[in-house]
Image (tube, grey):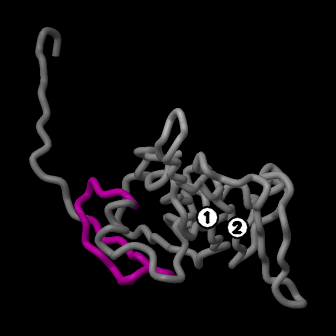
Amino acid sequence: YIGVEAFTTLTNVRDIQVLVAGNVLNPGPYVLNGNSTIFHALSVAGGPSKGGSYRAINLSRENKVIETFDLYDIFIFGKSSFGKRLRSGDIIFIEPSQNIISVTGAVKRPGRYELTNKESLYKAISFSNGLTRYADLETIKYSSIGPDGIIYEDVEDISDLKNIQSQDEDKIYIKSINIRNVAITGAVKFPGTY
C-alpha cells in the first residue's frame, strides 16, 4: 500500500533437531534453538572426543556435505565464523583426528596441535605462537615414526620445516639458550649481577 509502513516482530523461533555423530564426547540427537550454528551444537554435545578432529567437522544436509568446519579458526586465530545456521535433519559429523604434532622447548605456547595432511610441520610453529626470544635456532630437533622405527633429525634452518610433511605423532623440539646470572664483587668498577 502506498504511504503505509509495515513492521514485523519475530516473537518465537521454532526448535530444530540435529544429529551430532562421529568422534564426539556425547553423540546423539539434540533439540536446539532455530538460530543455532555448528558451534552451538558442538558445545551442547561436549565437543570432539579424545580421538576427534578439531580441524575436520562436516555439516551434512540431505546426504551432502555442505560445509567443513575448523575449530582452530576460532580457538587459535579468533575468527568469529560459527558456520551456517542449522536446519532440522542436519548431521554434524566429527572426523577422526589427523596428525597430532608435539611442539616443545622455546616456543610461546608449547603443546600438541592437529595438522591436516596437507600442512607442513612449520604450521605447528605458527599454532604455538612462534618462538620465544631465547630460542636457539641452531638446536632444532625433529623426530618421526618411520617404518623402521623412530627417526631423529637435526634441522639446520627452521624454514626447512616447511618442506617436511606432517605425520601423526611427529615431535619438534627447539632448545632455549641458557642464560645464567653471575655476581661480580670486590675491586671492580661496577660490581653487581650480570
Q: Confirm whether residue 155 shows in the render.
A: yes
In the image, taking residue 52 as reference, residue 34 lies left or right, namely left
Residue 21 colored magenta? yes
Q: Confirm whether residue 66 shows in the render.
A: no
Q: Name the residue beneath numbered marker 1.
A: 105
Q: Are marks 1 and 2 in contact (CB under 8 Å)?
A: yes
Q: Is residue 37 above or below residue 142?
A: above
Q: Secondary structure at mark 1?
A: strand
Q: Residue furthest front?
A: 187
| Boundaries of the magenta span | 16-38
What is the x, y in percent for residue 77? Answer: 49, 47
What is the x, y in percent for residue 146? Answer: 85, 83
Q: Residue furthest bottom?
A: 148
Q: Secondary structure at mark 2?
A: strand
Residue 171 colored magenta? no
Is 104 in front, or is 34? 104
**What's the residue type where badge 1 is placed?**
Gly
